[in-house]
Each structure stands twice: as structure tokens, then as C-alpha cells.
Image (cartoon, rainbow, N blue to C red):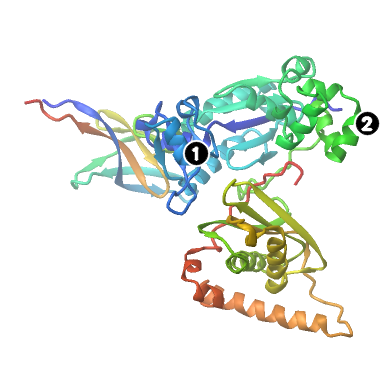
Amino acid sequence: MRGIAGREKRYVEVVSDTSPEGTVTPLSIIWDTGVRYQIDQVLDRRQAHSLKTGGTGIRYTVRVGSTTTHLWYEGPRWFVEAKVAAMPEW
Amino acid sequence: MDTTRAILHVDMNCFYASVEMAERPELRGRPVIVGGDEENRHGIVLTASYPAKRRGVKTGSALWQARQACPDAIIVPPRYGLYMRYSRLARDIYYQYTDLVEPFGLDEAWLDVTASAHLQGGDVMLIARDISERVLMELGVTVSVGVSWNKIFAKFGSDYDKPNGLTVITPENAQEVVWPAKVKDLLYVGPATTRKLNQLGIFTIGDLACADDELIRRRLGKMGAVVQSFARGQDSAPVRPLCPASHDIVHEVKGVGNGITCPFDLEDETSARQVIWLMGESVAQRLRAQGLAARTIAASGRDFHTLASRSRQATLPRPTQLTSEICSTAANLLVSDWDFAHGEKLRGLGVHASNLSPAQDTVQLDLWGVESRRQRMLALDKTIDELRFRYGNHAVRRLSELCDPRLSTLDPQRDNVVHPVSFFA
């Protein structure tokens, strides 16, 4: 099994809902491979800096299945701290 | 003297370099330099990170000097849009503590929390710490904060302990903290004032505070009295609230200026005049767009060899927004001040219009027809403005621009960021 070499800032497609008051709720994340990850719950929402990949924006702490992860809204784009797989050792 | 005020000065440390490190974590802890474009001869250090500064890199020095001091420095180009975004986000945080926020450039701001501190529990130190932690958490940038009863000492406090420091200056500890510092550490004491004060045997802020008022006034004039009152903490200037809705600097416009570092040297009067007309024209255009007229015109030049700047100004008999009057005044000032015949060369120049007043819709005509001629010129200028607005800045160009292809690379119409650089503005 390959480990994680690090994290990279990756901009992703997000389906979101905007309320009449202007509150934005992300509903699902669509990966560049086309796989759609349904967001089951938004646990937290705050302005925050990404320590791992750099950048700042509104950070949504979301639950996707049993995993809790972060999603940033950097207006007008969304990004995640994507895992970068380690190269296998020969 | 009101010593009950609670003023904070928040300074984002090594701002441009810190933002670059916040955006690119791989740069953290490395000697990072944000530098201008060397090809266009803007190759100076705009900001350096602390590891670079420790190795002797100085803000404002040439990039080649910086490379000599620190060969492994990582030099990155500036991204002003990004810095403005971070500046705005930081102000968003400040506005959650008070509506009295006065930005001082992109990276500094004064906050008056005297009336709003009770909303946060009444502890000003707690507010200062909270702001510092929030800026780090939310933006990834460290700030140093100065707390005092006046703006001058608050600014002194934020410079006192960098990075990420918090310094409180009260009437009780001011003499202990501020007075031993060198006199140049005080806001508005520049190299020339420092030299004059040193000649009087005044080396520290305490020396200045205790010096004879009359002596200081005689040697340094009105500004001497002002800086002496600063040294004594007798500054009652209010924190001027800006517009929280626009999150923008809405200072009353005091002057309109435009300057450029040329990609080529200006070795003779003709080319200097050509460039100054380009700069002056954009100044005049901006004055007309804002419905303002200026009475004082200044022209400045930067020497090719020493990189030192000097400027001259003239006051006109009546306010003007005419391109021809502004440009010819500026050009005459410049060529009278620089001796091109004896080898003086310019690296850059600028035009500045001040002493502003609203442009008059009605004018008093005179017997000699001068005013009616000026009105015709103004109508022509406004028509050119209109053409440029509709069809772009290159729709109407000066013959000198077309004759000298080098001039077409100059862009006097760049976005102008308004920096409220003057404390007295």
C-alpha cells in the first residue's frame, strides 16, 4: 500500500446551495476523475488559513461518509487539501 | 491630554513575504524576497522575510545586492491583487472589534477601541491578543500590536517587538519604554531630522521630549514642535473612521500623482519632456475624472547614478486641470532642476498635483481672452478623455509617443493604489 507524501492545494468542482439570505452550503464535491462525493453534514464554517497547502478562505468542516475533512471557499473557487501519494520504492 | 483612550496599532510583519509564505507553505522558514521586475529596472527588494533580513537583506536595496548578501534567497514577483485581498480580510477582522479603523498602507492600521472595548469584556489586552491570534489563524500571517493612549505610541509599540509581539505603552511606563529608543524610531523623524537633532546632541526620544521647546522650534520649525509633542505622547489625533461597507480607503484626496521608473535612461531634455508629458497627462486626466483642479504642480526626478530623488514645485496663479498647463509646468520644473548638458541622467520621474479644489463650473472671463482659450482647451481635453474612455487609452496618442517606440512600452494609466501614507493627511 502506498503512503501519503504530502498534501497539495487542489481546486475542485462543488455543488452548493445558496439560501435567499446568502448562506452557502456545499452539497457535494466532484473530483477531477468525475467521482462525486456527497457531503452528509457541514460541521463548522469559519474563515481560516490552510496550514498544509497554503491559502485562506471560508473553511467548511464537512463529513463525507465516515470521514471528516475540510473544504475551502476561496471566492469564487473551492479547494481541498488533496493527498499526494508517495512514489513506490523499488 | 486624554490618557484614557485605547488605541491599537496592528502591523502585519514582512507583509508581502508573509502572504507569499501563507500561500506557499514550502517557503516558510526560508529566506524569501518579494522583488520587482528586473527587466523593467524595478529590481529592488520590496519585502524580505526574517531569515533573509537576518542575512543582511534590506528592504529597498537592489536585487543583485540582496543576492550577494543571501545567495540562496528565493525571489518571487509581487502579486498585488493577493496582498490587497489579505489586507481586506485583515480589516474584516478589525471591524469586528470597532468601526474606528484607519488603515495606514496595506499592512498597518490603527483601531480605536475606547468606546467598544466593553463589548469584548473591557480588557484591551485581550482584544489585542485576540486580533493577533485571529489574523494568524485565519490568514496565516503574524502581526505585532502596539497598545497606547495615542496613535504615535501605539505605532511605536507595534514596531518595538517584532514579529508577533504585543507592547503596551501607558503613561506610567512610557518613559521607561519609549524614551531610551533612538529618536529616528519616532514616526515622522526621518534621516534629515535625525541629523539635525543629533547635531543638537539629541539622540533619544527622551532627549527630544526634555529638550527646550524654543530651541527645537528655532532649529526645526513647526515640524520640530510637532515631533517634540509626539515624543511627549501629546498626540490627540483621532483615529479617522473609514467606510466599513466599502472596506476601502476613503481619505479626502490631497493630491494626484504619477511616477515611473523608465526601462531606459533619460539622458536629454527632449526625452525627459516626452516622458513627463505622458505622466502629466494621466495626472490631468485623473483630476478631470474626479472633478478636481490643482494649483500646485511638482516634478520629481530620480538620479541615474545615486538613485536619490529630488523634486521641485510651483504654485500656479489659478487652479487648473488642463493637460497642457500641468505638463508644461512640470516639464519646465524638471529641466530647470536637472542639468542634462553636464551629464546628469534620470532613471525615473514623476508628476504630482496638489493644493486641490473642486473644479469650477462657472468661470470669470477676462478682457484678454485667456480664460476663453483655457475653456476651449478644457473642452478639447474632455473630448480626448471621452474618446479614451470609449475606445481605450491608445485611441488618442501624442505624437512623441508615436515617434519614439520606447515610449509606447510605458504605461502611465496603471491602476493607482491609494496609500494613506501621510499621518497628517
Say above or below: A64 vs B182. Answer: below
Of label 2 and label 1, which has the lower sequence position? 1
What residue sits right under mark 1 in the picture? B16
Instruction: Look at the image and tell me whether residue B115 can be seen.
Output: no
Please indicate whether residue B46 sits to the left or right of residue B313 in the image. left
Labels 2, 1: one chain = yes
Q: Which structural element holds mark 2?
A: helix
Amino acid type shown at disc 2: Glu
Label 2 crowding class (10 Å Cα cut-off): few <14, some 14-19, many 20+? few
Across and down, in percent, residue B407 comes to: 51, 67
Quadrant in the picture for the N terminus of chain B: top right
Instruction: Judge left or right: residue B106 versus residue B377.
Output: left
CA–CA distance in space, label 2 to label 1: 43 Å
Mark 2 belongs to chain: B
Instruction: Please state the total of marks drawn on the protein image.
Output: 2
- Badge 1 crowding class, 10 Å Cα cut-off, few under 14, some 14 to 19, many 20 or more, is many
Q: Which residue is mark 2?
A: B214
Q: Where residue B284 appears, x then y in whole percent? A: 67, 67
The residue shown at (86%, 85%) is: B368
Percent across and percent down for residue A48 are 45, 33
Contact between marks 2 and 1 (CB within 8 A): the answer is: no
Residue in the foreground of this view, choosing between B245 and B263: B263
| Nearer-the-camera pick, B194 or B421 | B194
- Amino acid tagged 1: Tyr
Classify B105 as above or below B234.
Answer: below
